[in-house]
Image (cartoon, grey):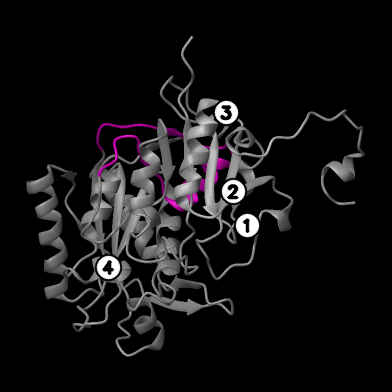
Amino acid sequence: MSQRPYTAVLIVPTGIGAAIGGYAGDALPVARAIAQVVDRLITHPNVLNGAQLYWSLPNAFYVEGYGLDRFASGRWGLRPVHQNRIGLILDQAIEPDLRLRHLQAADAARSTLGLTLTDYIVTDAPLGVELQTADSGATWGTIRHPDSLLRAADKLIAAAGAEAIAVVARFPDDLGSEALQSYRHGQGVDPLAGAEAVISHLVVQAFQIPCAHAPALLPLPLDAELSPRSAAEELGYTFLPCVLVGLSRAPQFVIGAATRPEDVWAEQVDAVIVPATACGGSAVLHLSQSAQVVTVADNQTRMRVTAESLGISALQVDSYLEAIGVLVAHRAGISISALRPEATQLQPFVEKSLLTRLGRC
């Protein structure tokens, strides 16, 4: 009898300054490598989006963060698709020339990549994106007119038949800020990521279809000291191409519908890979109850939430290279201890109290 497909979830939370995955799609090489040793890789736009750079992974599921949390909780399933019809929302606040740049990028995706888009829509009011930074250094944000965003999405879904939504919102330009300069030099936190997550969460929560966001910004001045990890965002006038590619084959959400054999549910996840200090997310907490959690120590973040502090049983490794080795062994059903030179004898079973087993005594 053949084994069931091996499924891994790769999470790098947005806007927390992750050393890998906190910049312009710089976790994409990790995703590409993991995709080679698993049957199904479930991850989110922060991992796969690299502005005008992207990489199509046939066995990867591109799942927005809110949808990923609902999947992990067991409430939503994931249904693979051959293609989605993408609706494009443009913020009314985007200047005419910058709007044209984004429309040309969308046309290029249609003509060069063969993606299917509906007619686009401009919001009936400026979205009013505002950026914030928490005391930890993590970034977040708000939009002043979420109702305008939701009205636009509703029209594209109901009248234009959109099956996924791409949003381009005008973000504040802050060319001289210390945070932006640090980020461009590979040392800071992405100042946009937290607000981007808020935008996509709103649409997915309201309409239960795939959504991702690309910020509209004025081009930045040349910087000879630019970090390679941030360089993908300097290639042109738009971050839209990777979003359209990701959404084109993003799985649809299964909610209270009759299931199909190809649908994927949380109980089928075998392993979760996450930065060692960023284990507090809803998806990790839910999936840790049934899947092997692998935490990566050298992917440092601004968070200080470890698996140990939450009582999560996890295997900590130093690097993603080591994590990939763990996945290979786990998929093969090989005990990690069998791959180490030290070997211990079996010990007699000793009954322990529940509190002791939980590590709280």
Between 148 and 82, the one nearer to me in the picture: 82
Furthest-top residue in this view? 1
Measured as percent of width and height from the top left, residue 297 is found at 56, 58
Label 2, label 1: how far apart the Cα atoms are? 7 Å
Q: Amino acid type of disc 4?
A: Asp
Q: Which stretch did the figure color magenta? A: 56-83
- Residue occupied by mark 3: 334
Q: Residue at x 27, y 78 (%)?
A: 226
Q: Which one is earlier in the sequence, the residue at label 4 or at label 1?
A: 4
Disc 3 secondary structure class: loop
Q: Which one is earlier in the sequence, the residue at label 3 or at label 4?
A: 4
Q: Which numbered tag is attached to residue 91? A: 4
Disc 4 secondary structure class: loop
- Is there a contact, CB below 8 Å, between mark 2 and mark 1? yes
Answer left or right for 127 relative to 198: left
- Crowd rating for badge 1 (residues with CA inside 10 Å; few <14, some 14–19, many 20+): some
Disc 1 secondary structure class: loop
Measured as percent of width and height from the top left, residue 281 is found at 59, 55
Q: Amino acid type of disc 2?
A: Val
- Residue occupied by mark 2: 284
Between 206 and 316, the one nearer to me in the picture: 316
